[in-house]
């Protein structure tokens, strides 16, 4: 069985696309080229996380790029938790 790179389900493609968009936008934000609120960019990552969970549970998606949104979403959740626990 060959592992597929790109997800086949619609929610899987959405989750991978949203996570890629999150990564690109957060890199642009860190470089100072994007005057956009960070929470709006993080919302893209969380939406990809939710769509990725739906693709894995609902559609039994097993593509390699379906795990990128899960990783991104977990990092965002840990970042939000750290901001709440240790505000600055």
Image (spheres, rainbow, N blue to C red):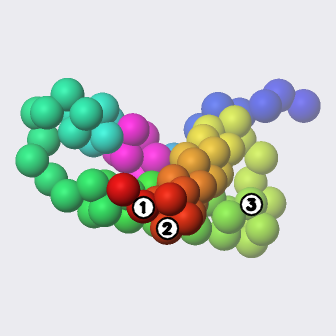
Taking the spot 80% from the left edge, 60% from the top edge, the residue there is 60
| In the image, residue 44 above or below residue 8 | below
The answer to whether residue 57 is left or right of residue 1 is left
Identify the residue position indicated by label 1 in the image. Answer: 87
Q: What's drawn in magenta, residue-wise? A: 17-23
Q: CA distance from mark 2 to mark 3?
A: 29 Å
**Regarding mark 2 in the picture, which secondary structure is present there?**
helix
The answer to whether residue 62 is left or right of residue 10 is right
Q: Position of residue 73 (x, y in %)?
A: 56, 55
Q: Nearer the viewer, mark 2 or mark 3?
A: 2
Taking the spot 66% from the left edge, 69% from the top edge, the residue there is 54
Tell me whether the residue at label 1 lies in contact with that at label 2, contact meaning CB atoms closer than 8 angstroms: yes
Q: Nearer the viewer, mark 3 or mark 1?
A: 1
Identify the residue position indicated by label 2 in the image. Answer: 84
Residues packed near mark 3 inside 10 Å, few (<14), some (14 to 19) or many (20 plus): some
Q: Position of residue 62 (x, y in %)?
A: 77, 47
Asked if the magenta segment contains residue 80, the reply would be no
């Amino acid at each position: 069985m060959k592992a597929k790179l790109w997800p086949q389900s619609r929610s899987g493609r959405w989750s991978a696309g949203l996570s890629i968009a999150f990564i690109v936008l957060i890199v642009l934000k860190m470089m100072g080229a994007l005057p956009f609120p960070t929470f709006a960019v993080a919302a893209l990552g969380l939406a990809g996380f939710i769509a990725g969970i739906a693709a894995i549970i609902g559609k039994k998606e097993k593509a390699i790029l379906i795990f990128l949104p899960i990783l991104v979403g977990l990092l965002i959740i840990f970042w939000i938790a750290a901001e709440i626990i240790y505000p600055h």
